[in-house]
Amino acid sequence: MASLDSVLDKDGVRLTVEDAVATVTLTNAAKRNAQSPALWRALTEAGRSLPGNVRVVVLCGEGKSFSAGLDRQAFSPEGFDGEPSFLDLARGSDEELDAVIAEYQEAFTWWRRSDLVTIAAVQGHAIGAGFQLALACDLRVVSEDVQFAMRETSLGLVPDLTGTHPLTGLVGYARALEICATGRFVHAAEAERIGLANLVVPTGELDGAVRDLAGALLAAPRDAVIETKALLQGAASRTYEDQRVAERAAQARRLRDLAGLGD
Protein backbone atom coordinates (compact mmCIF):
# COMPACT_ATOMS: atom_id res chain seq x y z
CA MET A 1 0.00 0.00 0.00
CA ALA A 2 1.27 3.46 -0.86
CA SER A 3 2.05 5.89 1.91
CA LEU A 4 -0.33 8.68 2.85
CA ASP A 5 0.83 11.70 0.86
CA SER A 6 -0.16 15.29 1.67
CA VAL A 7 -0.97 17.06 -1.59
CA LEU A 8 -2.40 20.33 -0.23
CA ASP A 9 -2.73 21.95 3.18
CA LYS A 10 -3.97 25.56 3.24
CA ASP A 11 -6.79 27.84 4.38
CA GLY A 12 -8.53 25.19 6.46
CA VAL A 13 -8.36 22.41 3.86
CA ARG A 14 -6.01 19.43 3.76
CA LEU A 15 -5.87 16.95 0.87
CA THR A 16 -4.13 13.61 1.37
CA VAL A 17 -3.95 10.65 -0.99
CA GLU A 18 -3.44 6.97 -0.26
CA ASP A 19 -3.59 4.65 -3.26
CA ALA A 20 -6.93 5.28 -5.02
CA VAL A 21 -8.55 7.09 -2.07
CA ALA A 22 -8.18 10.82 -1.45
CA THR A 23 -9.29 12.49 1.78
CA VAL A 24 -10.27 16.14 1.95
CA THR A 25 -10.31 17.32 5.56
CA LEU A 26 -11.68 20.59 6.92
CA THR A 27 -9.09 21.49 9.54
CA ASN A 28 -10.38 24.53 11.46
CA ALA A 29 -11.92 22.65 14.36
CA ALA A 30 -11.62 25.67 16.66
CA LYS A 31 -14.25 27.46 14.55
CA ARG A 32 -16.26 24.29 13.91
CA ASN A 33 -14.92 24.35 10.33
CA ALA A 34 -16.76 27.54 9.47
CA GLN A 35 -16.39 28.38 5.81
CA SER A 36 -14.92 31.37 4.00
CA PRO A 37 -14.02 32.36 0.43
CA ALA A 38 -10.43 31.30 1.09
CA LEU A 39 -11.62 27.85 2.18
CA TRP A 40 -13.79 27.59 -0.94
CA ARG A 41 -10.83 28.41 -3.16
CA ALA A 42 -8.80 25.75 -1.35
CA LEU A 43 -11.56 23.20 -1.92
CA THR A 44 -11.60 24.07 -5.62
CA GLU A 45 -7.82 23.67 -5.72
CA ALA A 46 -8.11 20.30 -3.98
CA GLY A 47 -10.39 19.07 -6.74
CA ARG A 48 -7.96 20.21 -9.39
CA SER A 49 -5.03 18.61 -7.56
CA LEU A 50 -6.37 15.05 -7.46
CA PRO A 51 -4.02 12.50 -9.02
CA GLY A 52 -5.52 10.62 -11.95
CA ASN A 53 -5.55 7.28 -10.12
CA VAL A 54 -7.97 8.51 -7.43
CA ARG A 55 -11.35 6.80 -7.57
CA VAL A 56 -12.92 7.65 -4.20
CA VAL A 57 -12.79 10.96 -2.33
CA VAL A 58 -13.73 11.18 1.34
CA LEU A 59 -14.73 14.56 2.79
CA CYS A 60 -14.54 14.99 6.56
CA GLY A 61 -14.13 17.64 9.23
CA GLU A 62 -11.85 17.68 12.24
CA GLY A 63 -13.35 18.16 15.68
CA LYS A 64 -16.91 17.77 16.89
CA SER A 65 -18.61 19.39 13.88
CA PHE A 66 -18.39 18.66 10.18
CA SER A 67 -19.01 22.34 9.36
CA ALA A 68 -21.10 24.92 11.15
CA GLY A 69 -21.60 26.84 7.90
CA LEU A 70 -20.51 30.26 6.73
CA ASP A 71 -18.19 32.21 8.99
CA ARG A 72 -20.30 35.17 10.12
CA GLN A 73 -17.29 37.44 9.64
CA ALA A 74 -18.35 37.52 5.99
CA PHE A 75 -21.19 39.85 6.99
CA SER A 76 -19.10 42.22 9.06
CA PRO A 77 -18.18 45.56 7.43
CA GLU A 78 -14.48 44.66 7.37
CA GLY A 79 -15.01 41.11 6.05
CA PHE A 80 -12.01 38.79 5.95
CA ASP A 81 -8.43 40.01 5.59
CA GLY A 82 -7.79 40.77 1.94
CA GLU A 83 -11.37 39.92 0.96
CA PRO A 84 -14.36 42.14 0.19
CA SER A 85 -17.15 41.70 2.70
CA PHE A 86 -20.46 40.34 1.48
CA LEU A 87 -21.85 43.83 2.02
CA ASP A 88 -19.22 45.19 -0.40
CA LEU A 89 -20.09 42.49 -2.92
CA ALA A 90 -23.74 43.48 -2.77
CA ARG A 91 -22.80 46.98 -3.93
CA GLY A 92 -21.24 45.65 -7.15
CA SER A 93 -22.94 45.20 -10.50
CA ASP A 94 -25.18 42.20 -11.24
CA GLU A 95 -22.47 40.76 -13.48
CA GLU A 96 -19.76 41.13 -10.84
CA LEU A 97 -21.90 39.60 -8.11
CA ASP A 98 -22.92 36.69 -10.33
CA ALA A 99 -19.27 35.98 -11.21
CA VAL A 100 -18.21 35.96 -7.55
CA ILE A 101 -20.98 33.57 -6.50
CA ALA A 102 -20.16 31.32 -9.48
CA GLU A 103 -16.54 31.20 -8.27
CA TYR A 104 -17.68 30.22 -4.78
CA GLN A 105 -19.88 27.46 -6.24
CA GLU A 106 -16.88 25.84 -7.92
CA ALA A 107 -15.87 24.46 -4.53
CA PHE A 108 -19.10 22.46 -4.47
CA THR A 109 -19.34 21.17 -8.05
CA TRP A 110 -16.38 18.88 -8.70
CA TRP A 111 -17.59 16.31 -6.18
CA ARG A 112 -20.11 15.09 -8.80
CA ARG A 113 -17.46 14.22 -11.41
CA SER A 114 -18.40 10.96 -13.12
CA ASP A 115 -14.90 9.49 -12.63
CA LEU A 116 -15.12 9.81 -8.84
CA VAL A 117 -17.38 8.54 -6.08
CA THR A 118 -17.42 11.01 -3.20
CA ILE A 119 -18.37 10.30 0.40
CA ALA A 120 -19.14 12.88 3.08
CA ALA A 121 -18.33 11.64 6.59
CA VAL A 122 -20.54 13.90 8.68
CA GLN A 123 -20.57 14.33 12.45
CA GLY A 124 -22.10 16.98 14.66
CA HIS A 125 -23.30 20.14 12.95
CA ALA A 126 -23.66 20.42 9.17
CA ILE A 127 -25.37 23.78 8.85
CA GLY A 128 -25.95 26.01 5.84
CA ALA A 129 -22.84 25.86 3.70
CA GLY A 130 -21.83 22.78 5.70
CA PHE A 131 -25.10 21.07 4.79
CA GLN A 132 -24.61 22.03 1.15
CA LEU A 133 -21.05 20.69 1.16
CA ALA A 134 -22.31 17.34 2.46
CA LEU A 135 -25.00 17.40 -0.25
CA ALA A 136 -22.33 18.02 -2.89
CA CYS A 137 -21.03 14.49 -2.35
CA ASP A 138 -22.53 11.37 -3.88
CA LEU A 139 -22.95 9.56 -0.55
CA ARG A 140 -23.26 10.55 3.10
CA VAL A 141 -22.26 8.44 6.09
CA VAL A 142 -23.27 10.18 9.30
CA SER A 143 -22.78 9.74 13.01
CA GLU A 144 -25.66 9.46 15.45
CA ASP A 145 -25.06 13.02 16.68
CA VAL A 146 -25.42 14.65 13.26
CA GLN A 147 -27.56 17.78 12.90
CA PHE A 148 -28.33 19.05 9.40
CA ALA A 149 -29.93 22.47 8.94
CA MET A 150 -30.34 24.93 6.07
CA ARG A 151 -30.30 28.29 7.84
CA GLU A 152 -29.85 30.64 4.87
CA THR A 153 -33.53 31.56 4.65
CA SER A 154 -33.54 32.53 8.32
CA LEU A 155 -30.79 35.05 7.47
CA GLY A 156 -32.78 36.50 4.57
CA LEU A 157 -30.72 34.56 2.01
CA VAL A 158 -31.14 31.45 -0.13
CA PRO A 159 -29.01 28.29 -0.34
CA ASP A 160 -26.79 29.19 -3.31
CA LEU A 161 -23.87 26.77 -3.04
CA THR A 162 -25.47 24.11 -5.29
CA GLY A 163 -27.39 22.44 -2.46
CA THR A 164 -30.95 22.91 -3.69
CA HIS A 165 -30.67 20.47 -6.61
CA PRO A 166 -29.36 17.42 -4.69
CA LEU A 167 -31.59 18.15 -1.70
CA THR A 168 -34.72 18.16 -3.86
CA GLY A 169 -33.55 15.04 -5.66
CA LEU A 170 -33.01 13.20 -2.38
CA VAL A 171 -36.08 14.18 -0.37
CA GLY A 172 -38.54 15.68 -2.89
CA TYR A 173 -39.76 19.24 -3.39
CA ALA A 174 -42.20 19.53 -0.48
CA ARG A 175 -39.82 18.23 2.18
CA ALA A 176 -36.90 20.24 0.75
CA LEU A 177 -38.99 23.40 0.91
CA GLU A 178 -40.02 22.70 4.49
CA ILE A 179 -36.42 22.00 5.59
CA CYS A 180 -35.09 25.15 3.92
CA ALA A 181 -37.91 27.52 4.83
CA THR A 182 -38.03 26.54 8.50
CA GLY A 183 -34.29 26.12 9.04
CA ARG A 184 -35.01 23.29 11.46
CA PHE A 185 -32.57 20.55 12.41
CA VAL A 186 -32.71 17.17 10.72
CA HIS A 187 -31.23 14.54 13.03
CA ALA A 188 -29.68 11.19 12.17
CA ALA A 189 -32.74 8.94 12.28
CA GLU A 190 -34.78 11.26 10.07
CA ALA A 191 -31.84 11.84 7.74
CA GLU A 192 -31.58 8.12 7.11
CA ARG A 193 -35.35 7.69 6.77
CA ILE A 194 -35.80 10.44 4.17
CA GLY A 195 -32.70 9.61 2.14
CA LEU A 196 -30.24 12.29 3.25
CA ALA A 197 -27.97 9.70 4.86
CA ASN A 198 -26.93 6.42 3.30
CA LEU A 199 -25.78 5.08 6.65
CA VAL A 200 -25.95 6.12 10.31
CA VAL A 201 -23.31 4.79 12.70
CA PRO A 202 -22.20 5.45 16.29
CA THR A 203 -19.88 8.45 16.48
CA GLY A 204 -16.80 6.37 17.25
CA GLU A 205 -17.40 4.15 14.22
CA LEU A 206 -17.66 6.85 11.55
CA ASP A 207 -14.12 6.55 10.21
CA GLY A 208 -14.26 2.76 10.05
CA ALA A 209 -17.62 2.75 8.27
CA VAL A 210 -16.32 5.18 5.65
CA ARG A 211 -13.21 3.07 5.09
CA ASP A 212 -15.37 -0.01 4.60
CA LEU A 213 -17.60 1.81 2.11
CA ALA A 214 -14.61 3.14 0.19
CA GLY A 215 -13.21 -0.38 -0.02
CA ALA A 216 -16.49 -1.74 -1.33
CA LEU A 217 -16.63 0.99 -3.99
CA LEU A 218 -13.12 0.12 -5.15
CA ALA A 219 -13.98 -3.56 -5.59
CA ALA A 220 -15.76 -3.05 -8.93
CA PRO A 221 -13.86 -2.16 -12.13
CA ARG A 222 -13.42 1.60 -12.45
CA ASP A 223 -14.98 2.01 -15.91
CA ALA A 224 -18.09 0.08 -14.87
CA VAL A 225 -18.58 2.40 -11.89
CA ILE A 226 -18.04 5.48 -14.08
CA GLU A 227 -20.63 4.33 -16.62
CA THR A 228 -23.11 3.40 -13.89
CA LYS A 229 -22.74 6.74 -12.13
CA ALA A 230 -23.27 8.61 -15.41
CA LEU A 231 -26.41 6.57 -16.13
CA LEU A 232 -27.87 7.30 -12.71
CA GLN A 233 -26.95 10.98 -12.80
CA GLY A 234 -28.78 11.46 -16.09
CA ALA A 235 -31.81 9.33 -15.30
CA ALA A 236 -33.92 12.10 -13.80
CA SER A 237 -33.60 14.29 -16.90
CA ARG A 238 -34.30 11.50 -19.40
CA THR A 239 -37.56 9.85 -20.38
CA TYR A 240 -37.94 6.13 -19.72
CA GLU A 241 -37.25 5.39 -23.37
CA ASP A 242 -34.23 7.72 -23.47
CA GLN A 243 -32.82 5.98 -20.41
CA ARG A 244 -33.22 2.61 -22.14
CA VAL A 245 -31.20 3.97 -25.06
CA ALA A 246 -28.52 5.30 -22.70
CA GLU A 247 -28.32 1.93 -20.93
CA ARG A 248 -27.87 0.09 -24.22
CA ALA A 249 -25.13 2.45 -25.36
CA ALA A 250 -23.29 2.18 -22.04
CA GLN A 251 -23.53 -1.60 -22.03
CA ALA A 252 -22.26 -1.80 -25.59
CA ARG A 253 -19.19 0.19 -24.55
CA ARG A 254 -18.60 -2.09 -21.60
CA LEU A 255 -19.00 -5.30 -23.66
CA ARG A 256 -16.60 -4.04 -26.32
CA ASP A 257 -14.10 -3.02 -23.66
CA LEU A 258 -14.29 -6.42 -21.98
CA ALA A 259 -13.82 -8.09 -25.36
CA GLY A 260 -10.76 -5.96 -26.03
CA LEU A 261 -12.52 -4.06 -28.80
CA GLY A 262 -12.70 -0.64 -27.12
CA ASP A 263 -10.98 2.47 -28.42
Image (spheres, rainbow, N blue to C red):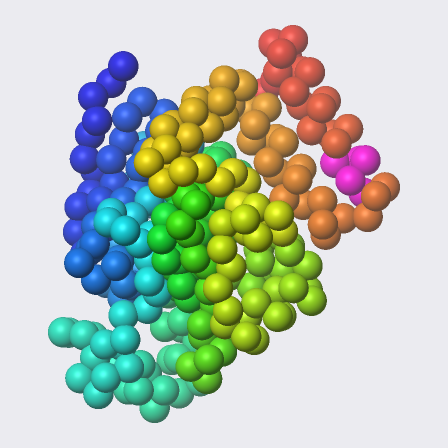
Q: Farthest residue in the right direction?
A: 241
Q: Nearer the viewer, residue 186 or 20?
A: 186
For the N terminus, the quadrant is: top left
For the C terminus, the quadrant is: top right
Image: 73 above or below 57? below
Image: 41 above or below 72? above
Which residue: 63% across, 60% down?
168
Q: Farthest residue in the top direction?
A: 259
Query: Could you tell whether 187 is left or right of 243 in the image?
Result: left
Which residue: 45% across, 74% down?
152
Query: Could you tell whether 246 is left or right of 130 in the image?
Result: right
Residue 22 x, y percent position in the rendering: 33, 34
Q: Nearer the viewer, residue 24 or 113?
A: 24
Which residue: 42% across, 81% down?
155
Q: Which residues are magenta?
A: 242-246
Residue 255 x, y percent position in the rendering: 69, 16
Q: Quadrant of residue 209?
A: top left
Q: Nearer the viewer, residue 16 or 250?
A: 16
Residue 232 x, y percent position in the rendering: 66, 40
Residue 58 visible in the picture: no
Magenta: main secondary structure? helix
Q: Quadrant of residue 81?
A: bottom left
Residue 208 x, y percent position in the rendering: 36, 28
Query: Could you tell whether 97 is left or right of 174 in the image?
Result: left
